[in-house]
Image (cartoon, rainbow, N blue to C red):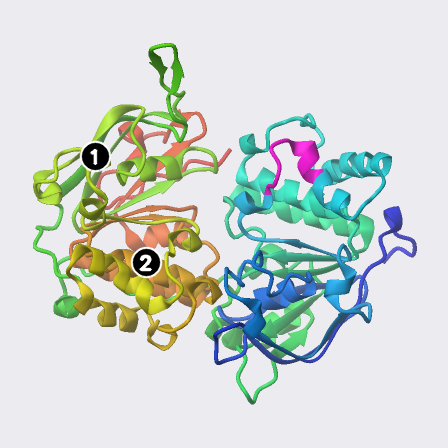
């Protein structure tokens, strides 16, 4: 470590003694009896299974735990939450040391606060009442540190890619000159190029400022060479200590490999086993929660010459001017029992295409048509279907599970769709069981772990019994175990005849589901050596085009 640190950043020390936290309305603590010392300037990778309380610890260190803004606090009331023991930064409570720690979360969209780049970076420092001239010096320096100095200060933040938004968030944190940088799965929602951009930016900033780092991420290989210590947490229970193992990265990965694999950590070189597709309705097909009457391969939805955009048409006088499409000409087919995977870099319109296909956004050009087998009398255009008609035919699972929750209790959440439709409530218990949510029926959905939220959002959509399931980045932020569960469950749904459409960067996931890969790129469609729209023949993956 260099002796003097740039720009007056003093690295922070963290101490925990018997620290614990229980979320409001939960019987079990999220973190229990945590004892921990992190010395100034140390760089720590925090691992552990989904639900081990890693995010809870980061929110506590950032001084935002129990705020309604905290990602895992949700709108729950913090009065009923319980804290025990002590958790201190430089010997003081994190709440009294705002600005000493900077927290970056996993969703690039929620990090960006303001519409112009420079203002967004200045926001945190302004809240700390840094003098005005000093702020802009810091803003320029921070943008330079994260590799965004080439963009003008009035550049619209909405025009940035996911990787750029995360680096912008990092710049905003650096401008506050924190002694402790907290990263909560900062690359979970990024494409492979964005992951490296963010990691390299973090590395440069740490080398320069000497700040203390705590990063939570399931994928070890990304951060392994940047950190000097790995700490593994285990879920809070009355008896065991919260820290399972603590040591130098290579040593921890070698000694505890099996234990880490059991805990769902993505250990380098390991891909978890998943259920195999049985192409002809294998022996277990009878026990599936979904029994479809459709022949495998039956066409359900088709996109022809589809142009998509999230923007609405503008009005000028009596004329309506259509928006410029992100993707001008997509042709794709969705078939019963087959997977369609939509891949490509951030910003190429994958989610927009999926939501248009799912009947949630109107096409800018071309058309989406449902076949008679799917529409069952509701008409050919899914965008024109009523809500009840849509959810019983095409179910959409959004990128952020929270956007989907409408009640304050897991059980109510699952019963919501069936009650509206007037049928399907008998399947709720089955779904709870299958997606391992039975023990959480009374929990507030907002207090679930990331893996549990994702399983709940899939379950709520399936409760309405749709024949097409559309998932936007279903594996973001999943640990290896929850990833394997989800992939296996989707493979069963496919075998039962459901069509599964997923937007994903995850090559392993694409491989497990099989079917057809549709690759979008930033300039429109391209996949060299493959038919139109980059689709290989069914069952054969199109060759992976390089991400620019």
**Residue 541, image x and y in percent?**
31, 43
Asked whether 151 or 224 is in front, the reply is 151
Q: Quarter-wise, where is residue 406 in the image?
A: bottom left
At a point 50% along the width and 80% down the height, the residue shown is 28
The residue beneath circle 1 is 384
Q: Quarter-wise, where is residue 325 in the image?
A: top left
**Residue 425, image x and y in percent?**
19, 66
The residue beneath circle 2 is 458
In the image, which residues are magenta? 112-121
At a point 39% along the width and 16% down the height, the residue shown is 315
At a point 50% along the width and 44% down the height, the residue shown is 191
Q: Is residue 106 left or right of residue 230?
A: left
Asked whether 313 or 398 is in front, the reply is 313
CA gap, disc 1 and disc 2: 24 Å
Q: Is residue 432 left or right of residue 11?
A: left
Q: Is residue 503 left or right of residue 304?
A: right
Badge 2 element: helix
């Amino acid at each position: 470590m260099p002796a003097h640190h740039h720009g007056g950043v003093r690295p922070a020390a963290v101490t925990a003694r018997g620290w614990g936290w229980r979320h409001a309305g939960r019987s079990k603590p999220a973190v229990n009896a945590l004892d921990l010392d992190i010395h100034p300037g140390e760089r720590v990778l925090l691992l552990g299974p989904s639900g081990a309380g890693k995010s809870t610890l980061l929110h506590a260190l950032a001084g935002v735990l129990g705020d309604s803004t905290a990602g895992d606090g949700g709108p729950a009331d913090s009065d009923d939450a319980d804290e025990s023991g002590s958790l201190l930064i430089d010997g003081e409570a994190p709440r009294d040391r705002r600005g000493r720690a900077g927290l970056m979360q996993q969703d690039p969209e929620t990090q960006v606060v303001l519409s112009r780049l420079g203002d967004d970076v200045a926001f945190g420092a302004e809240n700390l009442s840094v003098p005005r001239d000093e702020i802009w010096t810091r803003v320029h320096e921070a943008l330079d540190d994260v590799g965004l100095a080439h963009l003008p200060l009035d550049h619209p933040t909405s025009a940035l890619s996911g990787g750029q938004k995360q680096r912008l968030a990092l710049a905003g944190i650096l401008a506050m000159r924190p002694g402790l940088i907290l990263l909560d799965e900062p690359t979970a929602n990024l494409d492979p190029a964005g992951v490296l951009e963010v990691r390299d930016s973090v590395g440069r900033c740490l080398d320069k400022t000497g700040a203390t780092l705590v990063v939570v991420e399931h994928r070890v290989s990304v951060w392994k060479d940047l950190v000097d210590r790995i700490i593994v947490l285990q879920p809070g229970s009355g008896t065991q200590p919260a820290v399972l193992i603590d040591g130098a990265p290579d040593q921890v990965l070698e000694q505890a490999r099996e234990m880490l694999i059991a805990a769902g950590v993505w250990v380098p070189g390991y891909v978890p086993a998943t259920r195999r597709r049985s192409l002809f309705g294998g022996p277990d097909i009878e026990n599936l929660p979904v029994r479809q009457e459709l022949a495998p391969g039956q066409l359900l939805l088709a996109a022809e010459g589809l142009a998509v955009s999230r923007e609405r048409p503008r009005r000028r006088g009596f004329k309506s001017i259509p928006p410029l499409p992100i993707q001008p000409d997509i042709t794709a087919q969705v078939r019963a029992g087959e997977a369609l995977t939509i891949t490509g870099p951030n910003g190429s319109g994958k989610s927009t295409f999926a939501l248009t296909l799912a009947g949630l956004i109107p096409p800018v050009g071309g058309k989406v048509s449902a076949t008679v087998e799917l529409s069952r009398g509701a008409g050919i255009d899914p965008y024109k279907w009523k809500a009840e008609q849509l959810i019983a035919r095409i179910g959409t699972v959004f990128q952020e599970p929270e956007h989907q929750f409408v009640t304050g209790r897991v059980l109510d959440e699952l019963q919501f769709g069936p009650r509206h439709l007037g049928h399907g409530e008998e399947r709720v218990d089955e779904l709870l069981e299958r997606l391992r949510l039975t023990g959480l029926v009374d929990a507030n959905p907002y207090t679930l772990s990331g893996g549990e939220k994702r399983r709940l959002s899939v379950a709520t959509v399936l409760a309405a019994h749709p024949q097409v399931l559309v998932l936007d980045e279903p594996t973001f932020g999943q640990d290896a175990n929850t990833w394997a569960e989800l992939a296996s469950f989707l493979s069963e749904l496919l075998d039962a005849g459901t069509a599964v459409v997923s937007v994903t960067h995850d090559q392993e996931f694409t491989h497990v589901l099989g079917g057809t890969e549709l690759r979008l790129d930033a300039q429109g469609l391209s996949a060299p050596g493959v038919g139109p729209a980059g689709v290989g023949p069914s069952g054969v993956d199109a060759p992976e085009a390089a991400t620019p």
